[in-house]
Image (cartoon, helix red, strand yellow):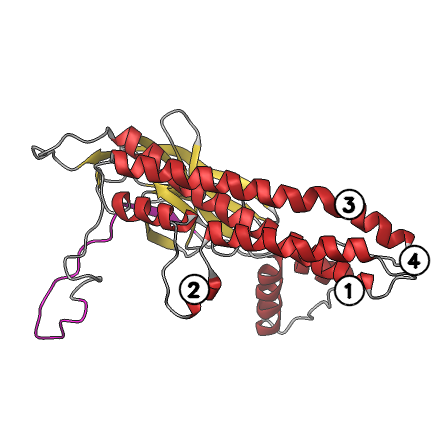
Amino acid sequence: SVKKEAFITTPRKSYWYQQRSVLGEGGKASQGDGYFVAQNPDFGVQFTYYMANSLKSSKEKRKEQESEAIKAQKEVAIPDWAILEKEELEGDPKVMLAIYGASGELVRLIEASNGKGFQRINWNLRRKAVGTITPENKDWKNEGPMVAPGKYQVQLLKIENQKCFELGERVSFEIEPLPELTPTIKGMSAEEVTAFWVKLDQAYSAVQLFSEQVKKEKRKVETMHKALTLSNKILADEFSALSAFSSNFLTIENLISGSNIKQQIGEENEYPTIYHYLGVVSTGVGGSTYGPTPTHLKCMNAAVSLLEKARKELEIVSSKLPEIEKKIRAAGVEIRLD
């Protein structure tokens, strides 16, 4: 009989490839019920684990004890405020799966079911998110590109009362590429391909983070404009300087995503943008394990170059704002820019 608190079984060998939908969407897409297709197994690695009992919070345990006392017609003790506040801070217990690479590095953390008995969960072979996590993207930036084929390990964890505990030993498993067909043109190795996917993901993250920085600087300029109207004297030079920053922000906007004015009437941009170059790369390598072509590498370099140019434009603004802020304060206006 099973007596362990929890354990995870050894997963079957899984295959590494890019999923493809020949109909443009998942399954039978828009073909209707007259077009029959069977559901494919979930992509990736399927983990099966066992929990002798589900994890329960202090609040759940207390309520169970109270229910038993009521059934037994015993007196139910009323918890004091300190206990209730402690329960509120504790949070719900969780079961997690930690996936490690061959060298022991943490590849991914997956929240699993906290149910009693045997449970199953699928890992889609994607690593944890790469790039910078911010308050703006923390709710959706959960995963990055796929890992490379190789040997991995998985371990059950539990989080109780804001503490993390291991549940049993790590279990090894393997991910292999699909049996190779003879390629017309030899591509990169799986390690090189996945490394480039990470680089592409980091590039998108860098642009997104930079865009957030631009928004913050624009808010600072808008706040300073308002502060100028409340100062004890007319600061004409500072007003002109703040107004001139509009040109810098317009240049940055055009470099990142193109002219907003042209987009309103469907006009194409005169020059490719950062997102245009990254889109070419993403479209070319996102659905293939072949790896980037010379064109993709050139587009990646072009995107990085434009991002650096945009950063220099923002630096022009950022370097001048502290002095303008100082003069606004000297004119009798208290201002907060963070």
Q: Indicate the amino acid at tag 2.
A: Lys
Residue 181 spot, x, y in % from top left: 8, 35
Q: Which residue is mark 1?
A: 226
Which of the marked residues, 1 or 4, is nearer the chain's N terminus?
A: 1
Q: Residues within 10 Å of mark 2 (few under 14, many from 20)?
A: few
Residue 292 visible, this orientation: no
Q: Is residue 162 visible?
A: yes
Local SS, label 1: helix
Residue mark closest to the camera, 2 vs 1: 2
Does 297 sit above or below residue 159? above
| Magenta residues, start to end | 29-52
Amino acid type for the residue under numbered disc 3: Pro
Estimate the spatial distance between the alpha carbons at disc 3 and disc 4, rounded to whole Å: 16 Å
Residue position marked by numbered label 2 in the rendering: 262
The CA span between labels 2 and 1 is 29 Å
Mark pair 3, 1: CA separation: 16 Å
Q: Secondary structure at mark 2?
A: helix
